[in-house]
Amino acid sequence: MRIDIITVLPQLLESPFEHSILKRAIDKGLVEVNLINLRDYSTHKQKSVDDYAFGGGAGMVMSIEPIANCINALKAEREYDEVIYTSPDGELLDQKMSNRLSTLKNIIILCGHYKGVDQRVRDLFITKEISIGDYVLSGGELAAAVISDSIIRLIPGAMSDETSALTDSFQDNLLAPPVYTRPADFNGIKVPEVLLSGHTANIENWRYEESVKRTKERRPDLLK
């Protein structure tokens, strides 16, 4: 899999891909992540990538020309399954979406910035707009990192235990059940006996019941 992230702040995105599961997936050759500096595609002497909005108003707008230059250059080398734009008014990221995106081969993620991008970018190039929540960030870089993390960890071989991702919260529209580790008794607070029983069927039933209980309490909307 290949993920090309177009950004005005590539340094901001370096750290997330240099640690843990994402780094291991990259080192194994399971995924290639490229941080592309949008300013490299600007034709302005100062390498600017934004301008004032037509009609006035506060905030700058990302210009179409450097974005078009960048995306066209990438598309000249390969086909892309999705060209994603990080936007607060995009479709809300969920596990189902991450599952689907993890099966794709080539993805572009354009990080929003300033007051947003020229609408013609969205009309001409973007195939999917994604939001990671109902709030506004300073830019789309952190959102791009979240999207990439949610995708890469699902690629077979990325996690040391591939079954772990299958039991994550939201995979079956349920929150994950409580988990415990040693010691079995901490200051009189004991781990549920069923988890120490070794009875697989009873353990799985307990986990399912606890998942349903937790989801009803915390995210009843998932059960609709």
Image (cartoon, grey):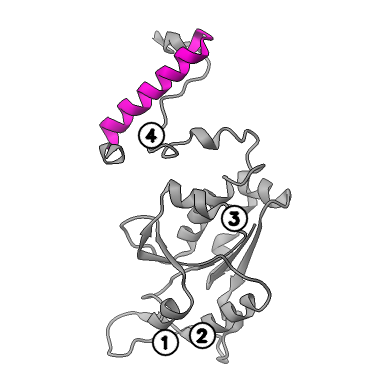
Side of 81 relative to 55 (left or right)? right
Q: Which residue is mark 2?
A: 48
Amino acid bearing label 3: Ser
Q: Which residue is mark 1?
A: 51
Q: Which residue is mark 4?
A: 175
Q: Determine whether the residue tagged by mark 4 lies in a helix, strand or loop.
A: loop
Q: Which residue is mark 3?
A: 15
Amino acid bearing label 1: Asp
Residue 61 in picture, x, y percent from top left = 39, 81
First in sequence, mark 4 or 1: give its number.
1
Q: Determine whether the residue tagged by mark 3 lies in a helix, strand or loop.
A: helix
Give the main secondary structure, helix, strand or loop, of the magenta stretch.
helix
Query: Alpha-carbon distance for marks 1 and 3?
Result: 29 Å
* Image: 122 above or below 165: below
Instruction: Answer whether labels 1 and 2 touch (C-beta < 8 Å).
Output: yes
* Image: 26 above or below 85: above
First in sequence, mark 2 or 4: give its number.
2
The magenta stretch spans which residues?
195-219
Disc 1 packing (10 Å; few <14; some 14–19; many ≥20): some
Decide which of 61, 128 is in the foreground and name it.
128
Side of 94 relative to 220 (left or right)? right
Amino acid bearing label 2: Ser
Q: Which mark is residue 93?
A: none
